Image (cartoon, grey):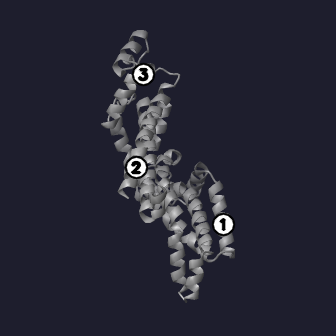
Amino acid sequence: MKNYIRKRILSIIPILIGISFLSFVIINLGSSDPAEVALRVNEVTPTDEAVQQMRNKLGLDKPFFERYTIWLGDSLKGDFGESYVNNKPVIGEIRQALPATLSLASVSLVITILISVTVGVLCAVYEGSIGDKITRGIVFLGTAMPSFWVGLLLIWIFSVKLNLFPTSGMETVSSIVLPAVTLSLAYISTYVRLIRNNMIQNKQENYVLYGRVRGLKESTIIKHIFKNSLQSSITALGMSIPKLIAGTVIVENIFAWPGIGRLCVTAIFNRDYPIIQAYILIMAVMFVLCNLLVDVFSASIDPRMRKEA
């Protein structure tokens, strides 16, 4: 297991370096001069002299790879530069917005796990029943509906018509209900289908037949089927955690949720390149690290993965 973990950690080092390079290159491929953008967002006339001074201040007068090396070294220390809009450290802006996003993603994850496991197991146990067919139809609709449309629909029903929840902001505890449900809906549909299909496949395995021959209770057999069906679900769930955090961009803007997704969209409109760059890097690194943790966890419970590696 130690050798497997060591090899996986070594394998992600070039991936992380490539991610940092791409996130730096993407920003530099923009048609706008970052120095001119930094002047305009602060309502300063971008004269040639002012632009040159700003380029010197931002280090844009240095060669490309030298700038990348400096930026990478500073990023490893947690220094992503300063925002063009308010001249505050980018890491401070991210720290301020990140807790709201993490709370939204956490509640969405809990809702996703509770509903998808419960519904998925019931659909597998009562395979082919009317309830199973109706649930599959609802799951299909849930997968097809875009999150921005679901969010607006929930606001119209539960906020405008029924006046049960706030329409936007992070004022009370109930403010998180609608955005969390909107964010989790697509994942619920995916995991209900995944758990149901895996359990139905495992119902055909020999150990289920042997369990029934031995006279085991049906509830005990279902527990074994559920346990053996979790492998792919755990892997998919681990990869959904960074997706939940990165996928809050649309939901946060619909519900005016003060998270990192809304911060990124605001930075895009203002062409605040340091914040955009930091967001791309942090989200990409989060995906890679979550993938690593999921692989290590899967290998710890399935020795076949370690042998294959």
Tell me which label, 3 or 2, sits earlier in the chain: 2
Callout 2 amino acid? Lys
Closer to viewer: mark 3 or mark 1: 3
Residue beneath label 1, please?
136
Residue 56 vs residue 295: left or right?
Answer: left
Amino acid type of the residue tagged 1 in the rendering: Arg
Name the residue tied to disc 2.
Answer: 7
- Mark 3 belongs to which amino acid? Phe
* 37 lies above or below 251: above
Mark 2, secondary structure of its residue: helix
Q: Residues within 10 Å of mark 1 (few under 14, many from 20)?
A: some
Q: How many marks?
A: 3
Residue 189 pos. (x, y %): 59, 61
Q: Categorize mark 2 by other alpha carbons within 10 Å: few (<14), some (14-19), many (20+).
A: few
Q: Residue at x 60, y 68 (%)?
A: 196
N-terminal of the pair, mark 3 or mark 1, is 3
Residue 135 in view of the camera: yes
Q: Residue furthest bottom?
A: 215
Tell me the residue that label 3 is attached to: 64
